[in-house]
Image (cartoon, helix red, strand yellow):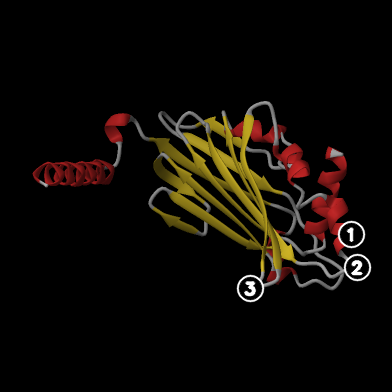
Amino acid sequence: MKKLLLISFFAVVISGCLNYNQHIYLYPDGSGKMSVEYWMPLPDSTGAPFLARLGLFDADSIRNEFSSPHSTIENIKIFSDSTDSTIHAAIDLSFVHIDSLNETMAFSDADFSLKDGAEGQKIFSQFIPPIATGFGIDGSKYFVKYIYTVSGEIITHNAHKEKKQTLTWNYSLSEIGSGKTISFTFRPFKLKETPYWIFFLSGAVLLIVIFFLFRKKKD
């Protein structure tokens, strides 16, 4: 069943009918959390039975596809969006080390890698397998997005966008070609290197709490 689902998943992607978003929060020790959402146009009455057999939007099949001994499925949500007539699957999971995602069927070709770099630095990479479009589908109209938020200072990257500790890659299916590798180097934050704005925010929250406590006592 797992093998069938994997083949079916790529069959839909290959036909150019699937959009995909992936957001990973990566912690200094290599553990983290992942949110995945993919969606496609709602099929007509003739295509609905085939889509049901694929299992792409079946919670049990998704759980099998994204599970591994070192990752935990936190939530699976299947829903339709009437505004654009699409069907969505959203998955939240946590992992003990990002390399362990390679053990899942869904990411068996992703080649997640987190290695030591220069002193105090980490080097990360993920491979995006080639996706061929066909059946008259315009691959430039379907997209994949990869977002990484890291607890550290970003040193180098090949992302399309950087904002603070968050990197974003955007590709249309036709741009992926023979495959893409997303990568970045970062220096994990130590406790004493926690960004100053975190302390500022924590202090502000504490002051607000104290203010309301004193106000409540006066009342």
> Which image quarter: residue 218?
top left
- Return the disc, 3 or 2, that comes first in the chain's sequence: 2
- Quote the CA–CA distance across marks 3 and 2: 22 Å
> Which image quarter: residue 216?
top left
Instruction: State whether residue 156 is above or below residue 101.
Output: below
Badge 2: few (under 14), some or many (20 or more) residues near its Cα, within 10 Å?
few
- Return the disc, 3 or 1, that comes first in the chain's sequence: 1
Badge 1: few (under 14), some or many (20 or more) residues near its Cα, within 10 Å?
few
Badge 3: few (under 14), some or many (20 or more) residues near its Cα, within 10 Å?
few
Could you tell me if residue 107 is visible in this image?
yes
Badge 1 is on which residue? 49
Q: At 41% across and 28% down in the image, what residue appears?
A: 119
Is 76 on the left-hand or right-hand side of 161? right
- x and y, in percent, of residue 176 in the image: 70, 59
* Amino acid tagged 1: Pro
The numbered mark at residue 133 is none
- x and y, in percent, of residue 209 in the image: 21, 43
* Amino acid tagged 2: Thr
Is 9 on the left-hand or right-hand side of 50? left
Helix or strand or loop: what does disc 2 sit on?
A: loop
- x and y, in percent, of residue 118 in the image: 45, 31
Badge 3 is on which residue? 83
Badge 2 is on which residue? 46
Instruction: For the residues labelled 1 and 2, say whether their Cβ atoms are less than 8 Å apart.
Output: yes
Instruction: For the residues labelled 3 and 2, say whether their Cβ atoms are less than 8 Å apart.
Output: no
* Amino acid tagged 3: Thr
